[in-house]
Image (tube, rainbow, N blue to C red):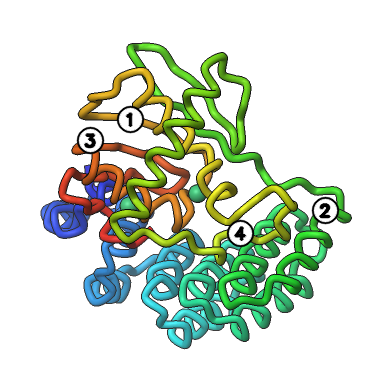
Amino acid sequence: MVNSYGLNGMGMQAIALFHQIPRELLGEATYVCALNACSHSGLVGEARLIFKNIEMKTMRIYSTMIDCLSRASAFDQAQELIDEYERNHSPESTMYMALLSGARNAKNVYLSQNIYDRMKKLFPERKDPLVSAAVLLANVYASSGEIDKASDIRLEIYKSGTKKKVGLTWITVDGQVYTFRAHDRSHPRSNEIYAEGEKISNEIIKYGHQYDSSWITRVLDEDETVESVLCGHSERLAIAWGFVANPNASKLQMVKNLRICGSCHRSTKLIAAIRQCEMIVRDANRIHHFYKNGQCSCNDYF
Ligand SMILES: [Zn+2]
Ligand SMILES: [Zn+2]
């Protein structure tokens, strides 16, 4: 229950419930859930208090706390915890990934590059975390306008032979599940879906949305624009399909296998408000409730 509150952006309720659990029942899982809930609601002070009172601090507990501090851009304290942990243990890539995600969110190029270089030294054999780290690093460079640098990193990932996981979104429409990948044209009603996608895009632009190239980490092809690339993300296609099938839909529910990108997150908030349609998106990290008032339950902590 603590975890469910946390995933749904109800950090205060999660903490209140956590404090009702008798001490003898508290263990690694409860601590991780409570710290996670703090982390996703920006309750850093609460997290610090909980962490301080934990007697047996495991690797997962350290990682979760480091994630919480990194999300709040408390990088020095996160680093101190890593140092503390490494006094008695070998380094863990998840801790560095948490730090790097935080640095990415803060668009801190210098710190991101620094963490990535350390990861390469510490975990030369761990291909998967290194690829994920490289993707984050490319994102940081892209968001600070260094597209060439971002493309170089992507090329490096490509050459290493490891592929980035393909982003997929599943949507339930009239009791049936449909799957979309980015720039998907496999649906028999693709033309209508893309037309609807364009219509939605025009609506959100009218309400002040700007497509942000920093969410793109590759060089665009000649026939692409920032808008066309971002509108082709799998969740945007799924939303468009939802409205093609039910033009007056008041609720859409989706699942995405990766983390939702910042551009889709911002667009979806606007779409929910303009179309007066509540949208629930479960991504790799949490559950987003996009309300009709244009806000998301995650309060943009994601
Ligand atoms: Zn996206
Ligand atoms: Zn959200």
Q: Nearer the viewer, mark 1 or mark 3?
A: 3
**Which quarter of the rendered picture does the N terminus lie within?**
top left
Label 2, residues with CA under 10 Å away: few <14, some 14-19, many ≥20:
few
Q: Is residue 159 left or right of residue 233?
A: right
Q: Earlier in the sequence, mark 2 or mark 4?
A: 2
Look at mark 2 in the image and give the residue it sits on: 158
Measured Cα–Cα span from mark 2 to mark 1: 33 Å
Q: Earlier in the sequence, mark 4 or mark 1?
A: 4
Look at mark 4 in the image and give the residue it sits on: 216
Q: Considering the numbered disc 4 on the image, is that residue within a helix, a strand or a loop? A: loop
Residue 195 in picture, x, y percent from top left: 47, 31
Residue 76 in picture, x, y percent from top left: 47, 87
Mark 4 and mark 1 in contact? Answer it, CB < 8 Å. Answer: no
Measured Cα–Cα span from mark 3 to mark 4: 27 Å
Label 3, residues with CA under 10 Å away: few <14, some 14-19, many ≥20:
many
Look at mark 1 in the image and give the residue it sits on: 253
Q: Amino acid at mark 1?
A: Gln
